[in-house]
Image (cartoon, rainbow, N blue to C red):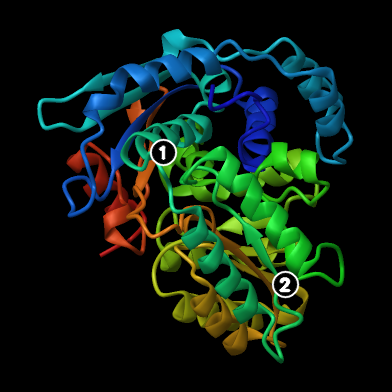
Amino acid sequence: MIITSLLDTDLYKFTMMQVVLHQFPGAEVEYRFKCRNAGSPGIQDLAPYVNEIREEIRGLCSLRFQDAELAYLKAMRFIKSDFVDFLGIFRLNEKYVTVTAQPSGEIEVSIKGPWLHTILFEIPVLAIINEVYFRNTQKKPDLAEGRKRLDTKILELQADGLHELKIADYGTRRRFGKDWHEEVLRTLSSRLGTGPTGQFAGTSNVLFAMKLGILPLGTMAHEYLQACQGLGPRLRDSQVFGFESWAKEYRGDLGIALSDVYGMSAFLRDFDMYFCKLFDGARHDSGDPFQWGERMLAHYVKNRVDPKTKTLIFSDGLTVPRTIELYQQFRGRCQLAFGIGTNLTNDLGYDPLQIVIKMIRCNGQPVAKLSDTPSKNMCDDEKYLAYLRQVFEIA
């Protein structure tokens, strides 16, 4: 079994799930899978592995949270006891997920049901698809090449003048495999060091954070702000509603706002002085990161906030060289954090799968993300996309 613990997922799944339990327990949602590089050279069809994927999902749905896992979550200051009590009786239900092979050779994965009972499917299902794919297509993986590449990254990060540059692992969903993921984390922890003086800040993966004694990291994902399109009082106010609902839940904790659900310009219009002061910073996940960072710093100055008191998190397709470039441009001007995903956990010389599972409906109506990287948009209702662009004044 690939997934052997329900903690083998990203922290922001739990932080969002707690908001769902407390504020939107009746929300109904639908998610859809997409392989962005299907049909590309070097990428094989996923359809032959459908039965294997289904079997792994069946195993996932047999899992329960263990007492030690619940105790670990409960020890986090922002996790409330009633949420932990709920997790104590929680299990994923296979009836909410369907996996089918398509004539094209691709697969279709649909997750549909109560948000509270489906939110934990995304990350482990993506990790399952990745690992099933690679254990079939790379039966003897070149781990030596992976270790060589990881060593190169570590040496680049240890160069003179970069001792204050910290990176984090955001690579659960697209990892080559669970065992390799753990090896990467153990290597980073030992070679870069953790804690205040180390360069390895932590991981988004809660299981490995607990197992290896490193910091779990994460706040919110796109699905949270997308769902607010179907939950808020008015579509134009959905981003503001999402931020206010988040602040109501966490009262200053987990204060990193996601900036690219409607594009940067729409984000800045809504992220006024109140939110600039209320939130600790913002996360970049699409569009040019250098331009984004400069716009964020200028926005803070315009709103009479010292950028040095705020954190910019970069997490879009980062490599170590790109991370170093960003660090050198913004160091000393604000606080910085970098989350590296696929390039850390799936860099053994094989083409990684660019796979996602995105929310496409909430409470029966379409929801969408209007990214600064158009290829990241995912919605099956063109009329709704046009309406969303009009409402948020997006060209």
Helix or strand or loop: what does disc 2 sit on? Answer: loop
Return the residue at label 2.
Answer: 310
Q: Amino acid at mark 1?
A: Asn
Check disc 2: other Cα within 10 Å, few if <14, some if 14-19, many if 20+: many
Q: Residue furthest left?
A: 103
Residue 320 locus on image (x, y percent): 54, 73
Which residue is at the front of the view, 254 or 53? Answer: 53
Residue 249 horizontal/vertical position (percent): 74, 38
Q: Residue at x 47, y 45 (%)?
A: 176
Q: Name the residue nearer the viewer: 235 or 261.
A: 261
Question: Left of 237 or right of it: where is 103?
Answer: left
Image mark for residue 130: 1
Q: Residue at x 53, y 84 (%)?
A: 325
Q: Is residue 129 left or right of residue 121?
A: left
Give the quarter of the figure containing the C terminus: bottom left
Q: Secondary structure at mark 1?
A: helix
